[in-house]
Image: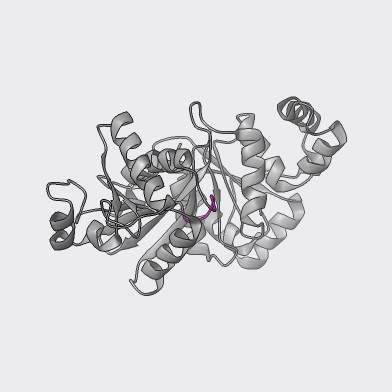
Amino acid sequence: MSIFENFEKKLSAESKSIVFTEGTDARILSAASRLLAGKTLHVILLGEVEAVKKAAADGGFVIDGAEILDPATYPGFEEMVAKMVQLRKGKMTDEQCRAALAKSNYFGTMLVKMGKADCLLGGATYSTADTVRPALQLIKCKPGIQSVSSCFILMRGEECIAMGDCAINIDPSEDEIVESTVETARTASIFGIDPRVALLSYSTKGSGKGETVDKMRNATTRVQEAHPELKVDGELQFDAAVAPEVGQLKAPGSPVAGYANTFIFPNINAGNIGYKIAQRLGGFEAYGPILQGLNAPINDLSRGCNAEEVYKMALITAALI
């Protein structure tokens, strides 16, 4: 049974809801119809009600059972505005909150914040920033977490690996590397990966010098001390992380070197390039970015996504609850 079949089985036994911010998009409607047909999730589609119904009919998608909500006619809109004003604590006026909530990205995020939905998936037409910004402002980080990070899950046949942070933090600090390492290991475990986490660098165990080397080495030490239950090592070059003959030569006895399946990059340049090399040259399917560190699952789609990717990202998002 594949990981996605496991997710379907698990979610069908629960009663979770997902909100899609772009309710008239054909890719969203295709995924929604599959989720509804399988009784996998309760689906909330955002948009003008008749427009959503027409788009579904035009595409031949059956969305019976979906809840369609239009911010312009939502009965609890004023309550939502008041709640957002309170959350923003003087940073946004009543009118600014009202204008923001007229947009489905903010409206959908507030549905999650107010417990009307369990999770959100957006970005089929919105930018990553337009999905992440409302989440940071309204959902906010989990207790003890100071920053949001991301990871991609990459699959090739039965092989499954995790890579982070490839999409959010441009040049993460040492503190942010520590947090994203722990969060990425937790995400990996949800996908059945027993995480062996390599903090990557152009240096292995002091073979190179530089600020980013120090950052990855120091972050490794801090994670090892705070989370002795995790298998973590660094700083490691990529070959030392994945090739046993190299890893065990350079870091003998390491539980990670040569056997890593979860990779932490020093910055977004390396991370974004790295996962796309794996995807395009290595034949891996890439799912993400999966946002980490938030109080509720909010995830972003690529604007170039297809219906199959939307469906699988919906399963992933709900599985994070």
The residue shown at (37%, 51%) is: 213
- Taking the magenta stretch, the answer to whether it contains residue 135 is no
Q: Is there any visible trace of residue 8 in the rendered image?
A: no
Note whether 88 is above or below 48 in the view shown.
above
Q: Is there any visible trace of residue 246 in the rendered image?
A: yes
**What percent of the width, then of the height, locates residue 20?**
61, 49
The residue shown at (29%, 35%) is: 224
The residue shown at (74%, 50%) is: 49
Quadrant of the rendered image containing residue 305: bottom right
Note whether 85 is above or below 194 in the view shown.
above
Which residue occupies the extreme bottom position in the image? Answer: 281
Q: Looking at the image, which is closer to me, 37 or 46?
A: 46
**What percent of the width, then of the height, locates residue 69?**
71, 43
Which residue occupies the extreme front position in the image? Answer: 209
62 vs 234, left or right, is: right
Q: Looking at the image, which is closer to me, 233 or 14?
A: 233
**What percent of the width, then of the height, locates residue 81?**
78, 31
**What percent of the width, then of the height, locates residue 36?**
51, 49
Quadrant of the rendered image containing residue 10: top left
The majority secondary structure of the magenta stretch comes to loop
Q: Looking at the image, which is closer to me, 278 or 110?
A: 278
Q: Looking at the image, which is closer to me, 54 or 294?
A: 294
Per the rendered image, the range of residues in magenta is 166-170
